[in-house]
Amino acid sequence: MPTRELSRRNFLRSAATGSVGAAIAATLQAQGFAASAPLSTGSAQRNGITVESIGAYSVERLNEILTTELAEFSDFAISFPPAKNGVKLYRVTYPSVIPEKKNRPTVASGLIALPDVDEKTLPVAMYQHGSVFGKDEVPSSPENSMETRLMIANFAGQGYMVVGADYFGRGLSQEPNSYIVKPSTQQACLDMLFAAQMACADFGVEMGSLFVNGWSQGGWSALVFLNKLESVGIPVAAAAIASGPPDLYAMLNRWVNNWQEVDAVYIAPLVSIMLHAYEEYFGLPGFTTSAIKPEYQEVARQLYFNEQDYKDLMSEFPAKLPDMVQDGFKTALAMGDDRFSYLLQESHGYRWRMTTPMRVYTGGIDEVTPVYLGQLPIGYQQIIGGATVEAVDAGPKADHRGVFLTSLADAKAWFDELL
C-alpha cells in the first residue's frame, strides 16, 4: 500500500484556516507537544507521520456492517440509517512521547476514515475504542474491530471524518499495554489528532467541528482526552460517553469489594492487565505480585505481555474478580491511602469544570459499568456550574453492547443537530 510522509509546513498552513485546525496549530507552536518537533524533518520510518491506504468500504459494504454484521454482534433491538457514501481507510503512524517515562519518544498508530464526498470541510468524530485483548483489535485494523466498523459505517458513511487512536501498546506500537493509564492515553489521543490534522493537508480537506465519543474503556478515554483538549484550548462541539467509568477508584472498589452477579466474567483478566499496566508505566515494582494471588500471577503476566491468546487463557482466570486478588490488596483499596489508590483517584475523568456539552449513556443490565457510576459527571457538573451533562438511558434490557449501540445512534443525531 502507498505510504507518504506529510510536511509540517502544509499542516500549519491548512490548520490556520479553521477554528479547530487553528487551535491545534497554536497548541503545537505554543505548548511544545510531541507532535510539533518531529514532523519537520526525517524519514517517514524514523520520525515522521506516515499515512498508509488500507483500502476502502463501499456503500454496500457499509450497509452490510449496519445490518448483517450488526445482528451477529448483538441482538439488541436497534437500527441505523443506510450509508450515503463510501469511505477511504488509512492507517497512520505518528510520533509521540510517554509522559510516565519522562517523555521518552515512541511511535503509535491509529485510523483515519475519510468519507468519499465532495465537501472540503468535514465534521470530525474522534472515537476512543473500548477494551480489547488482541493487540490488533484496534481502529487501525478495522476488519478486526467490530466497534470500529460500526463507527465507520454510522459516522464516516454519513460524511464525518472518523479518527481513532490505537493507544500505546496496541496496534503497531511496540510499548507495553497502557490500559487505563491516564497521561499516556491523553498523549496518544492528542498526538493522533495532531497527526490527523496534518493528514488533512495531504487529503485536501479541512477539519470542521470536532466531536469526541467512546465506549467502555473508550468512554473513560474520551473523558480524559476531553480534559486534555479543554486544557490546551482545542474546542470540542460535544462529547458522548457510552458505559464509560468516570471514576476508576470507585469502579475498582465496586468490582473488588462489592461484586455483583451481573458483573462480566472478563473483568478479572481486564483488571489483571490494568494492574500490570500501572506497574509498568508508573514504576511500581512488585505491585502485581502483591495484588494478584500466586495461582493467577503467571497467567496474568502471559496475558499482559501477549504471550498467549486471550481465548486460550480465559479458563485459567476466576469468574469473579475478588477471587483473583489478595486480601491485602482489597484492604488497601478500601482505605484508599496507598500509591495505587492515589493513582486511580488522579485518573478520574470528570472532576473539573467542563465547558463541553456531554451525554452519558447507561443501561439497565450493563455488565461492566453500573448506571450510578456512569452518571457521576451529571451531579458533579451541576455542583460546580460546569457544562450540561445529560443522561441517556438505553433501557432496562440494555447490556454493555446495547449501551454502545444506543450511543452510536443517539450521538450521531445529536452531533448532526450541532453542526
Image (tube, grey):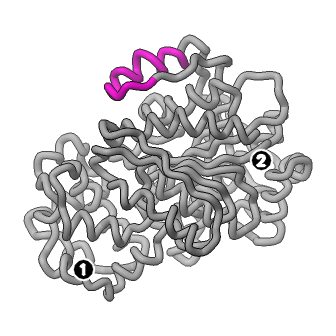
Residue 186: image location, x then y, percent:
57, 63
| Residue 170 highlighted magenta (yes or no) | no
Q: Main secondary structure of the magenta part?
A: helix
Give the residue drawn at x 25%, y 43%.
309
Does residue 48 appear to the left or right of 91 in the view shown? Answer: right
Q: How packed is label 1: few (under 14 Cα within 10 Å), some, or many (20 or more)?
A: some
Disc 2: which residue:
198
Residue 20: image location, x then y, percent:
80, 52
Helix, strand or loop at disc 1? helix
Residue 315: image location, x then y, percent:
11, 46
Give the residue drawn at x 59%, y 63%.
187
Tag of residue 334: 1
Quadrant of image for the C terminus: top right
Does residue 142 appear to the left or right of 85 in the view shown? Answer: left
Helix, strand or loop at disc 2? helix
Give the residue drawn at x 31%, y 83%.
336
Quadrant of image for the N terminus: top right
Q: Is residue 113 above or below residue 250?
A: above
Residue type at mark 2 is: Met
Q: How packed is label 2: few (under 14 Cα within 10 Å), some, or many (20 or more)?
A: many
Which residue occupies the extreme left position in the image?
295
- The magenta segment: 62-78
